[in-house]
Image (cartoon, rainbow, N blue to C red):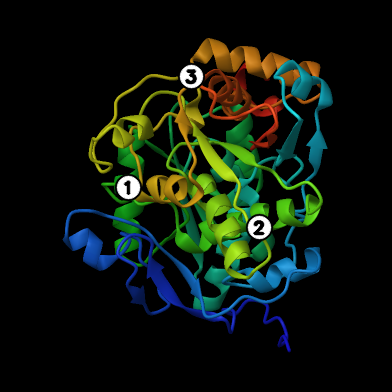
Amino acid sequence: MRGPVRFGKPSPLLSGMRCIKCRRLWPINDYFFGCPDCADAGTPASVAPDFASLPGLGGLDDIACWLAYPGSSHLGEGNTPLIDLPDLAAQHGLTRLRVKNEAPNPTGSHKDRMSAALVRRARDIGVKKLAVASSGNAGASLAAFAANAGLGCVVVTTADIGQAWRRAIELHGAEIIVAPSAAARWDLVSAHTMMGEWYPATNFAVPAVGSNPFAVDGLRTIALELYLASETDPPTDIIVPVSRADLLWGVARGYSDLASAGLVSKLPRIHAAEPFPRISRVLAGEDYFGHFDGRSPLRSLAGATVTYQAIDALERSKGAVVAPSTDETTAAQTDLARAGLFVESSSAIALAGLHALRKRSVITDDASVVLIVTSHGYKEDRWQN
């Protein structure tokens, strides 16, 4: 029999933090540089909450019991719509095409799932000030959830942050610190974290390991919602926009957990769509902890790092990776808008990725495809007055 949900405290099912690479189980704690053993070996990898067992999943109310930190909604995050796009499915010669639309979250992106999970962890360990390196969605999201929880928040950004983002963050009461470069943001967050002044939401380790694992844990809920919404027609393929692969890994891990709990017998393939070759180069033989230069106007996806969690997600789901061009992504944004969904260009890369995967015959005619759309298009600076 399932015990009571303990809000703001670790799940009684949480057994520790397990390295996703070497599989060593560590005590429940914060590991900002990932697994200590893998870091010492020069092959950094993140850790993730590990569960002794998982409960049943009969409805949306049960999802909280699957999290490292169970809890009710803070601002209405989660339970986002799964939308059928039959005309686009026909255009791509598919049996079915759906969009898991994360734009209806409180601040308009999937980052709200991470912020909610992080706030529950912060409350448990007595954190007073959260920190995030961001120039967009993550900063606005953490500022909102910190304000709701009565916590301090620092958003470390760069001078090119959009005015709409700046205004939202400041109105939520968060402090904005402008760093001279994207790399300098990480240095600043690292210094204050090591002094115990800030509790970080995002990666600052070099080489990168990914965002705070308690925040990433919140992204598993996307897979759980997809399972509940599509039991009669589960997706065969899911396509995810990728930077350092927090979202990719969260969805893949969620489905792995569903399989471990005996709720799904066949995992969907979960594919990565990146703006220029990074993961692609790693799969071709380069070290994942290297530096990967590339240019892209898709700012939220344009980082030069790859994490082991990207490799782990693709391996566990047997997914592929594609790197559509900017022109292909722009065309995909238009196609989604003509279907009624105005999405951020970084989200539209999922549809551009579908086109590329179809051309490579990775996704077949009888596939049932889900695209993860992370944010709406009104957030992009070019649409602001």
Q: Position of residue 117 (x, y in %)?
A: 60, 63
Above or below, 239 relative to 126? above
Quarter occupied by residue 100 = top right
Nearer the N terminus, badge 3 or badge 1? 1
The residue type indicated by label 2 comes to: Thr
Q: Is residue 87 above or below residue 327?
A: below
Q: Which residue is mark 3?
A: 297
| Neighbourhood count class around disc 1 (C-alpha, 10 Å): few under 14, some 14–19, many 20 upward | many
Q: Which residue is mark 2?
A: 221
Q: Amino acid at mark 1?
A: Ala
Whole-number angstrom distance, CA of label 3 to CA of label 1 = 21 Å
User: Which comes before the other along the chain, label 3 or label 2?
Assistant: 2
Question: Could you tell me the amino acid type at mark 3?
Answer: Pro
Write down the residue under mark 1.
208
Please name whichever residue, 310 or 36, is drawn nearer the observer in this view of the structure. Answer: 310
Asked if disc 3 and disc 2 are in contact, CB closer than 8 Å, the reply is: no
Residue 30 seen = no
Secondary structure, mark 1, is: loop
Which label's residue is closer to the chain start, 1 or 2? 1
In front here: 157 or 359? Answer: 359
